[in-house]
Image: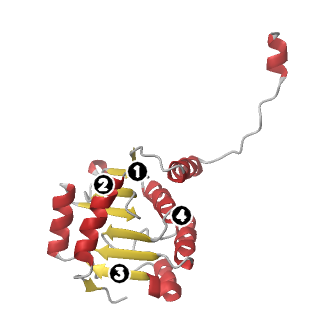
Amino acid sequence: MDDSTTMSKELPETKKMTRDERYLDAVDNLAANKMSIPFESVEPNHAGAVLCSLLKYSNKEIRIYTHTLNGNIPGDNKNLKFELEEFLKQKRRLKIVVQTPHNHPSKSFNELLEKYREYIEVRIANEDFQKSIEKACKNEVFFAVNDESSYRIETTDTEKSKRKAIACFYDPPVAGNLSKVFKAGFKGLEIANL
């Protein structure tokens, strides 16, 4: 074969994407294909990308255990706000347990509460709940899990350099265990006054 023939063909044009857009695209691909490949997800924008895909590919429920609601749920992340709204429009359930109840939710979370309150439950973690999570995960963690198949787990270290976060879009044993511990304690928790 003549090299000049192969070289003269132009490569197809590709869409220019930012690093964050490429990450979001890659994460969405892993989720859409239910890949059982654990991957790191430490940066706040990476957490948002994973949560977007957890929401997008959930069939009925997302369970989140987090420090507070005044941060990144959904914060100013337009993709996350869009996916949360789409998730709730389909009458899916969002169950959240917060560790620190005294902080006020972000403005964007309050907007979602106003529109979809009947599909959102927020409760306050007590010591027993926190201990059960720590026992099950062998560490203090926050997490999001959907439909008992996918998750994102993050250690609670306040020092960013020590923080670790892992996500996986198909790991029923781990996701199922997180869901089981969450469900076991959820009903007995105090309802957050939002």
Front: mark 3 or 4: 4
- In three-dimensional space, the C-alpha distance between marks 3 and 1, rounded to whole angstroms, equals 24 Å
Q: Is mark 4 on a helix, strand or loop?
A: helix
- Disc on the earlier residue, 2 or 4: 4
Camera-side residue of 156 and 137 = 137
- In three-dimensional space, the C-alpha distance between marks 2 and 1, rounded to whole angstroms, equals 9 Å
Q: Residue 122 carries which label?
A: 3
Q: Which mark is residue 56?
A: 4
**Is the residue marked by circle 4 packed among few (<14), some (14-19), or many (20+) residues within 10 Å?**
some
- Disc on the earlier residue, 1 or 4: 4
Label 4 amino acid?
A: Lys
The residue at which mark 1 appears reads as 168
**Residue 76 x/y as whole percent:** 52, 69
Label 1 amino acid?
A: Cys
The residue at which mark 2 appears reads as 174
Q: What element carries label 3?
A: strand
Circles 2 and 1, Cβ within 8 Å, touching? The answer is yes
Left/right placement of residue 26 relative to residue 159 reads: right
> Considering only vertical position in the picture, is 187 above or below 59?
below
Label 2 amino acid?
A: Val
